Image (cartoon, helix red, strand yellow):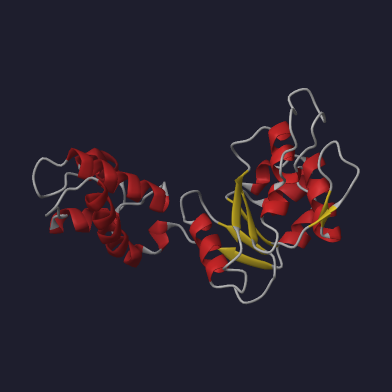
Amino acid sequence: VAATDANVLLLGESGTGKALVAQSIHRASHRAAAPFVSVDMGSLSSSLLESELFGHKKGAFTDAKTDYAVRLVEASGGTLLLDELANLALPQQAKLLTALQNRTVVPVGSGQAVAVDIRLICATNENLYQAVTAGSFRQDLLYRINTVEMVLPPLRERKEDIPLLLQWYLQHYAERYQRDGLQISVADQRILQNYHWPGNVRQLAHAVERAVVLAEGNTLDFSQLQSPVQTASVS
């Protein structure tokens, strides 16, 4: 997929690593030397999101004191990741669809179109097909962005990855906090591998970081997970 310019839709629960997959696709593409621009659509209001995506001209609205560069233009030649896509309101969905079809964007307050050349990757933990049925997401936009659809499985369905992730994050946070000689006990390894990880890889990373920060000896303490671990099914 990376070698093409096909639009990619990444689906999966929160914390499964959709943004990392998007970055990997970009790095393996012919656009790798160009910008990788990410927009977290879940953290922005509709008005801010429109400016982030499409830019605006000075004076377009009360607080528009200067021209603001558009993310689609910043990503031109490279890859644009629209994370948490389901948060995009219907008016912005229509404008995004037009931009993708025409390969141009018109900043808010401007009548002049700007050409863009992007490889689009979208990510969401929502069911966009249900959103289409409910009328909150445009069907024509869905068909435009899901040329290739990739579903990232939750961590509980790929438990063989857990030991690798534990060791990687242990090394990462031990270096960050300058803690040498830390290790995870065999008993904890077994418990952690059978934990259901509702927050997926993101939760695992936070658990390891917290254990590294609070470690009083060489063996990490994961007692903060003991209660949910003990109630989780162990296979």
Q: How many marks?
A: 0
Q: Residue at x 30, y 52 (%)?
A: 195
Return the x and y of residue 46 as percentages of the image width and height: 72, 34
Q: Is residue 197 left or right of residue 112?
A: left
Q: Is residue 234 visible?
A: no
Spot occupied by residue 61 in the image (x, y as percentages of width and height): 80, 27
Could you tell me which residue is drawn at 61 percent across and 64 percent down?
34
Quick one: 94 or 155, which is closer to the camera? 94
Q: Nearer the viewer, residue 188 or 231?
A: 188
**Left/right of residue 139 with respect to residue 79 in the rendered view:** right
Question: Looking at this rendering, what residue extends furthest in the top direction?
Answer: 62
Residue 10 vs residue 68: left or right?
left
Q: Residue lying farthest front?
A: 66
Depth check, front residue: 69 or 211: 69
Q: Which residue: 69% across, 71% down?
A: 5
Dividing the picture into quadrants, the one containing residue 166 is: bottom left
Picture layout, residue 41 above or below residue 1: above
Position of the N terminus, as image quadrant, is bottom right
Q: Is residue 101 visible?
A: yes
Q: Position of residue 69 (x, y in %)?
A: 71, 44
Query: Which residue is outermost to the left?
Result: 217
Q: Which residue is nearer to you in this view: 51 or 4?
A: 51
In the image, 181: left or right of 56? left
Which residue shows up at 70% across the image and 63% down it? 146
Quarter residue 35 falls in: bottom right
